[in-house]
């Protein structure tokens, strides 16, 4: 779970949630997206309706954001898996394909 950030209130409006998710978790969500999700009852973080206002508890935002991120993964290229260069079809890994005339010379490296 994300580190506790005491400068953020325990309950937030959609505008505050949008800022919080961007600054703390790196998600870019507009308040209108949060409103749409809440009205449809799908995809978004859980919230409470307090009269006409909708408020989001920070604790539930963190849980939602962490689940949305999913499990950490390694890049397939960093795990040593082999692929074919789309340009020359030679086996490659990591960063560049050194074969001249390949359109992907900056993205792949030929297996030795």
Image (tube, helix red, strand yellow):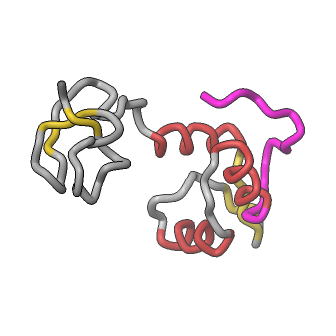
Q: Is residue 99 magenta?
A: no
| Quadrant of res 59 | top right
Q: Residue at x 73, y 64 (%)?
A: 14
Residue 22: image location, x then y, percent: 69, 53
Quadrant hosting residue 73: top left
Give the x, y percent position of residue 80.
Answer: 24, 24
Q: Residue at x 64, y 44 (%)?
A: 25
Toward the front, the furthest residue is: 100
Q: Is residue 48 left or right of residue 9?
A: left
Which residue is more in the foreground, 75 or 1? Answer: 75
Question: Magenta stretch containing residue 9, yes or no?
Answer: yes
Q: Nearer the viewer, residue 43 or 100?
A: 100
Region rendered in magenta: 1-15
Q: Among all residues in the image, which is located at the extreme right? A: 7
Looking at the picture, tell me which residue is in the foreground, 60 or 111.
111
Residue drawn at (86%, 33%) of the image: 6
Left or right, residue 101 beside residue 47: left
Q: Position of residue 28 (x, y in %)?
A: 62, 60
Tell me the residue at 26%/42% (across/down).
97
Name the quadrant of the C terminus: top left
Residue 53 in the image: above or below residue 65? below
Residue 71 location, quadrant: top left
The secondary structure that most of the magenta stretch takes on is loop
């Amino acid at each position: 779970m994300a580190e506790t950030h005491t400068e953020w209130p325990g309950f937030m409006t959609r505008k505050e949630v949008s800022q919080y998710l961007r600054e703390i978790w790196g998600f870019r969500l507009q308040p209108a997206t949060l409103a749409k999700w809440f009205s449809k009852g799908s995809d978004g973080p859980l919230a409470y309706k307090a009269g006409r206002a909708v408020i989001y508890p920070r604790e539930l935002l963190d849980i939602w954001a962490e689940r949305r991120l999913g499990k950490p993964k390694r890049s397939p290229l960093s795990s040593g898996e082999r692929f074919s260069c789309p340009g020359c079809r030679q086996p490659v890994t990591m960063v560049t394909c050194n074969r001249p005339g390949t359109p992907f010379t900056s993205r792949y490296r030929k297996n030795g």
